[in-house]
Amino acid sequence: MSGPILRSWLFVPANHSRRVEKALGLEADAVILDLEDAVAASEKGTARQMAREALSLPRHPRLYIRVNGLDTGLALDDLEAVVRPGLDGVMIPKVESARDVHIAAWLLGQLQGRHGLEEGTVELVALVETARGVERAAEVAAALPAPGRIAFGAIDYSLDLGVSHAGAAEALGHARARLAVTCRAAGLEPPVDTVYPDIRDGEGLEREARQARALGFGGKLVIHPDQIAPVNRVFSPSPEEVAWARRVVEAFTAAEEAGCSSIQVEGKFIDYPVAARARRVLALARAAGAREE
């Protein structure tokens, strides 16, 4: 894993210029200009052009664009319009197989070459949001080119299963665990968790974000500016975690130099796996700090 640390991913309809300009100045780690669900069919062409124009705007976050699905007849026009200098990545919705990834990656590669971009300049994000996509997550992950990552779309996934999103904790937990393990096994960046649709329920958002982080997710899709700060906080190491990690690394480094690889810190057993986790916490804290700066 070597990609940027991206905790909060803010969706914005591409055809709302004021919202786009505002979003690009917020503290989200990434902004996703949406050409799909948030845009009416009659507005698709306008949204496509506005997304392309947004590539030249000054911004703080990285800029991604969610195109329409590969089976809609719109994805090619979307990609041709937006794969230009200034684009950090594209999100492909309803990815269900390696074939979907191969098609998207081939198109992306051709368009990057056409516009003078080096291969791998534009990241490919596969949005998995169906039962078939979750079931085939391993082949999706294996097919993703570098850089690439997976995001989870739980609302459409719940619809596909025929269950209530609000009451589908077990079904969503299964899907989340499968995606997290799959991404780790494939050497991808940690997956990105689904949106939390109730923008007034801050406690529920934090609770769901913490559950996703505990399973191995690295960030979360958000739909409102008020959701950015809580998500950034949850997916960053806390001051207590950082302090613990520093104590562990310092003690273990000293022990190694003395020829010992098994010690106790504050009454807890520390060996190589625990020390490796502590170093990972410090690396994540440094990366999150760099994002804030």
Image: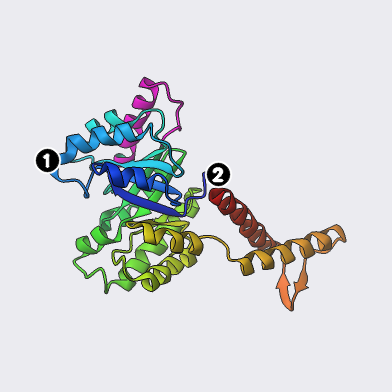
Tell me what residue is drawn at x 26 percent, y 49 percent.
94
Outermost residue toward the bottom? 267
Q: Which residues are magenta?
A: 100-122
Q: Which secondary structure dominates the residues rendered in magenta? A: helix
Q: Which mark is residue 42?
A: 1
Coloration mode: rainbow
> Where in the figure is residue 211, as x and y percent of width and height?
44, 69
Q: Position of residue 214 (x, y in %)?
A: 49, 67
Residue under label 2, please give it: 2
* Residue that appears at 37% across and 41% down: 64
Q: Is residue 1 left or right of residue 149?
A: right
Cα–Cα gap, marks 2 and 1:
40 Å
Q: Is residue 98 visible?
A: no
Nearest the viewer among 59 and 154 is 59
Where disc 1 sits, the SS reads helix
Residue in the image at 29% along x and 44% along y: 18
- Dot 2: element: loop
Q: Mark 2: which amino acid?
A: Ser
The reply to whether residue 167 is in sight is: yes
Q: Residues within 10 Å of mark 1 (few under 14, many from 20)?
A: few
Q: Which quadrant of the structure image shows residue 285?
A: bottom right
Q: Residue furthest left?
A: 42
Residue at 77%, 62% in the rendered image = 250
What's the amino acid at mark 1? Ser
Q: Position of residue 133 (x, y in %)?
A: 30, 53
Q: Position of residue 277 (x, y in %)?
A: 63, 61
Q: Which mark is residue 145?
A: none
